Image (tube, grey):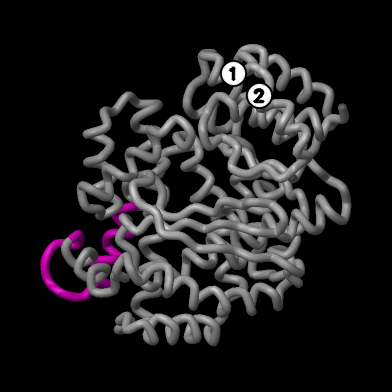
Amino acid sequence: MNVAERYLELGLRLGRHVDGLVDAYYGPPELKAQVDAEQPVEPAQLAADADALRDELPDGWLRDQVHGCATYAHVLAGDEISYADEVEGCYGVRPSRVPESVYEEVHAELDELLPGEGTLYERRQAWRDRHLVSGDKVVAVTQDLLPVLRTRTNALLELPAGEELTLEPVSDEPWWAFNYYLGNLASRVVLNVDVPTTGLDLVHLVGHEVYPGHHTEHAVKEQVLIRDRGKIEEAIQLVPTPQAVLSEGIAEAGIDVVLDDAGREEAYAVLRSHGLELADPALSERIAKAAERLRTVGLDTALLIHEEGASEAEAQAYVERWSLMSPEQAQHSVSFVTDPTWRAYVITYSAGRDLCRAYIDGDPARLATLLTEHVRIGDLLAAAR
């Protein structure tokens, strides 16, 4: 068994212990059948196996991935590892709290931008409520937005022939949307209709989950790396690995590269065709851009709970205050960072976004590189310095 197969086997064995840890697998079916048929391997043994495999590998992308698996296996085995060390070991990025002064600045900016009367929270909620998409319309609107972003993504790099996806509504999940990559160039994208969503949110969602985000990355890399180059290590997507930082970073940063002003206007025309209000697109974009800086509140919340010992009630109050969320939304956010599968994952959104933006630096060719190559977190960190 070569090192790539051993990595796939390690990831599949880890996935036997935590539901959802294997985000996708489309490698050799006989390998999965073998792991499914065997008794689960004890976490301590998986940690030892991961350490041994990592130490055999040269410095590179695969070694980074195995180190993430090793870190997670040690956590699963009950080893004493701090939350910050767990996050850094899995993702290659050290988490740190954002000063509250940053959020105060964002609040001041939003205070200038948001119209109406009342508290900042009330005005932000009123602005969002004005633009919400009813749950029964979410899939239809998203379906009509797909061709707009697909055309522009295909202009950046040729999408593989036969790539396809399906959209489905879901409820009662700790996330907003999810891409289940199925292999064979296909995705199933599910949208959580419980989460209040605006038309502008849906434009972002299509960019994040489909074009040029998760579906695009996985389909292109399946074609380029697995089918064309035989790199079967790409055939597993694991939650606690650096690969996730890159994927979320592409999903967050890619839309700004592929969607120009004309493309945005076309997307807004789709929203209007469904009777959705977009009173002032330029103002909506400025508000969304300012509020984007609040995304790190999620990571701060995880650090409050897991590093500083805050209660879930204290963490929820923190989210409500700085993210300007309702108690229900804040509770949803806390449930994500306390979920055993996702508690460390929260860093991937903000860190991935910032690191990929720094790496791309406005150059579409750099986005194409991220979508077609195994770029390491160290390469992203070097670009951000």
The one nearer the camera, 1 or 31, is 31
The one nearer the camera, 371 or 384, is 371
Q: Which residues are magenta?
A: 103-121
Within 10 Å of the Cα at label 1, are there few (<14), some (14-19), or many (20+) other Cα atoms?
A: many
Q: Main secondary structure of the magenta part?
A: helix
Q: Where residue 316 appears, x then y in whole percent?
A: 25, 40
Q: Real-space Cα distance between discs 2 and 1? A: 6 Å
Count how many numbered circles sit on residues in the image: 2
Amino acid at circle 1: His
Disc 2 + disc 1, Cβ < 8 Å: yes
Q: Which residue is mark 1?
A: 74
Q: Where residue 107 appears, x then y in whole percent?
A: 28, 59
Does residue 98 appear in the picture of this structure? yes
- Examine the rendered structure and indicate whether residue 65 appears above or below residue 138: above
Magenta-colored stretch includes residue 110: yes
Q: Which residue is mark 2?
A: 70
Residue 351 disc label: none
- Examine the rendered structure and indicate whether residue 47 appears above or below residue 180: above
